[in-house]
Amino acid sequence: MEQVISIVVRNQPGVLMRVAGLFSRRGFNIDSLAVGITQNPEFSRMTVTMQADDSTIEQVCKQLAKLVEVEALKVLPSNASTKRSMALVKVRAGDKKMEVLKLADVFRAHTIDVTGDSFTFLITGVNEKLHAFVDVMRPYEILEMVQTGAIALERGEEALNVESSRYSWPKIVDDSKDRKACVVI
């Protein structure tokens, strides 16, 4: 079954590689991965979706918790969380422009570019909605498309929020004055 893991990590170089590497080394496939900054710029939130049973997901969480950059993580319950993805779909409309626009409107897709005979649509929602939109647009010739990984939050008052790191991290020193002295000519 599909599992969604929400992971709060330190916002620093190499963290994505370490987390993705953990999945790779253990032979786990990531279906979707999205990373973005949180309300606190020191931390980023990763949303990972994967097909796994309960024992596998438990093993993944134990391994993730061992990574020093991982501050908090939680498997989001499917019945108590909201999950969305986004897709950009470029369609050749030809002489059926009005027909394509009406279909896009049914899916609440936004037209973000019109060039010649093509439209680029932005659509958000659950994967099933995005896939249905793509299936409807296929007869009109999809020129290209891209889809983001899912992002998700648990419903209600429960929050996976990290105010400060569980570790002491070295402070970044502004050495811009020192760098000016080291100019290569």
Image: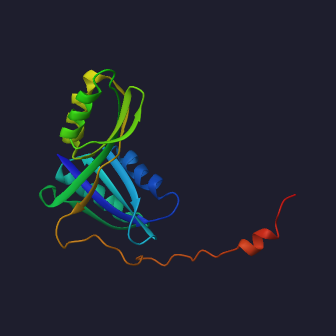
Q: x and y percent of residue 4 in the render?
A: 24, 54
Please determine whether, in this image, residue 150 is positioned above or below residue 184: above
Residue 27 visible, this angle: yes
Residues 184 and 10: in front is 184
Q: Quadrant of the C terminus?
A: bottom right
Toward the left, the furthest residue is 79
Looking at the image, is 160 positioned above or below residue 105?
A: below
In the picture provided, is 137 more to the left or to the right than 165? Answer: left
Q: Quadrant of residue 67?
A: bottom left
Percent x, y for residue 184?
A: 84, 59
Residue at image position (43%, 50%) is 21
Depth check, front residue: 109 or 129? 109
Give coordinates of residue 54: x percent, y percent: 17, 53
Relative depth, front residue between 107 and 97? 97
In the rendered view, does 146 fall on the left or right side of 133? right
Q: Is 125 on the left or on the right of 171, as rendered? A: left
- Work out which quarter of the rendered image holds the N terminus and state it: top left
Residue 107, percent from left and from top: 20, 40
The residue at the point 18 percent across, 39 percent down is 106
Depth order, front residue of 48/87: 87
Q: Is residue 29 visible?
A: no
Q: On screen, 170 above or below 78? A: below
Q: How is the image coloured?
A: rainbow
